[in-house]
Amino acid sequence: MWTPDSWRSKVDPQAVPYDDAAALESACARLRELPPLVTSWEITRLKRLLAEAQRGERFLVQGGDCAETLADCRSPVIANKLKILLQMSLVMVHEGKRPVVRVGRFAGQYAKPRSKAVESREGVVFPSYFGDMVNRSDFTEVGRRPDPDNMLVAYSHAAMTLNFVRSLSAGGFADVHHPEYWELSFFRRANVSDTLREEYERTTSQLAEALRFMEALHESSVEELTRVDFYTSHEGLNLHYESAQTRRVPRREGWFDLTTHFPWIGERTRALDGAHVEFFRGVQNPVGIKLGPSTTAPQVLELVDAVNPNNEPGKLALVTRMGASKCADVLPGLVEAVTRAGRLVLWVCDPMHGNTQTTPSGLKTRDFDDILREVERTFDVHERCGTHLGGVHFEMTGEDVTECIGGAAGITIDDLDRNYASACDPRLNYRQTLEMGFRIAKRLGSHTRR
Ligand code: PEP
Ligand code: CO
């Protein structure tokens, strides 16, 4: 039988080696009392929007840092994350001619799975960095020691982030009637090409014009089309944190994980008999599952059955991250199996995690062209299979970092040192993200027209 604690009897391949059981219990006890970060009605609303995306009536744009850090919980950084997510999504609304749902990888993306439990540098060995919810990135004994109180610190930073995101949204930050307010100053300082700037300005002014026109006609869907909400997501990796905030709520069935709207299960923790599938099969939230290139069709069908046994619309997102070179070989078999079984899923493409490479100097990077190629091939596969690609999932930032190579900015391996700021995986910078948005939006538009 499922309970918020039934995962404890299963294997967690990424279990944090907390060494003080009493301190862990006391942090969890406090987390159980603290108010939720999100509400059940927001979760239910998002599920409805994801069901629309599943049917091809909406598109999901999900993105943010690989690893959020406590240090980056600052107003300009948060505002820039919203801006780039908003701008990317507006481009898609305009070209793709369909509404978008925006989901940030923020307000909780503080726990990271690692391929190695320990890191060694010049003969010194400490635990790996598992994200600010667990330990610190400083390579010292104290820094790398997992401390359960970091869950409380992460909770409070998630709350501060969310508070600011909600205030900005409510205050008209993202009022699409006035794109001129939120984009110009940003564009002036941003390092974008004139063509991109002009294309974007043309898009936003056409968008504002179209809105005025529709409102003049009293078109009832305007509110729905222009309403700008941001939902939150993170990898539900640390199950102590997730389960402590999982509750029943008045007048609704079931249990809600109230740390975030839309948690996902990572590629390393999606074992059918593992702790993460056990935990997330019991919550009402929509759930994502990352699927890497080694995924088989029987595995997917078992996961779908476990996490969404009632075939509920909007409940399950399968986030494929195959890599540009493997996607055309692996994905069709999975899509066909799910379709043949009559299972409702939202297909999402994460074109980042299958395309990571390491430079000769040891930096992780990704090539803009590989990323774009994976998105395009994923569109091709769904087109051939008669299914919808319902969304994209990016690691991206509103800052001018140099972590991914390529794009019109022409970032090369030699530029990576200039501003490599990620605490984990390489993100598309501001300009690369916008450029990617335009490329995908064009494809989305041609799909819609067909
Ligand atoms: C991530 O999204 O940062 C991540 C670790 O992804 P995956 O589980 O797909 O490797
Ligand atoms: Co990542």
Image (spheres, rainbow, N blue to C red):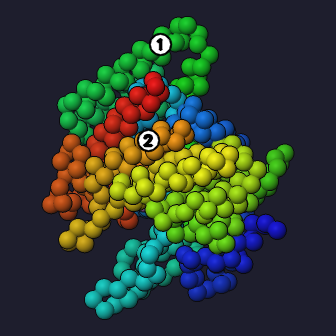
**Quick check: marks 2 and 1 in contact, CB under 8 Å?**
no
Q: Residue at x 45, y 15 (%)?
A: 210
Q: Is residue 174 at least partly visible in the picture?
A: yes
Q: Residue at x 17, y 55 (%)?
A: 412
Q: Residue furthest top?
A: 217
Q: Which residue is mark 1?
A: 212
Q: Is residue 95 left or right of residue 346?
A: left
Q: Is residue 72 at least partly visible in the picture?
A: no
Of the image marks 2 and 1, the number of the one nearer the N terminus: 1
Measure the alpha-carbon separation of dots 2 and 1. Answer: 32 Å
> In terms of image quadrants, where is residue 155?
bottom right
Q: Residue furthest bottom?
A: 123
Looking at this view, is 76 or 221 the one in front? 221
Q: Is residue 101 left or right of residue 415?
A: right
Up/down of 383 relative to 236, above or below: above
Residue type at mark 1 is Arg
Q: Which residue is mark 2?
A: 379
> In terms of image quadrants, where is residue 156?
bottom right
Count neighbours of disc 2 (C-alpha within 10 A) and say few if under 14, some if 14 to 19, many if 20 or more.
many
Q: Is residue 223 left or right of residue 127?
A: right
Residue type at mark 2 is Phe
Q: Residue at x 46, y 33 (%)?
A: 173
Up/down of 76 relative to 176, above or below: below
Residue 419 horizontal/vertical position (percent): 24, 58
Q: Secondary structure at mark 1?
A: helix
Q: Is residue 201 left or right of residue 59?
A: left
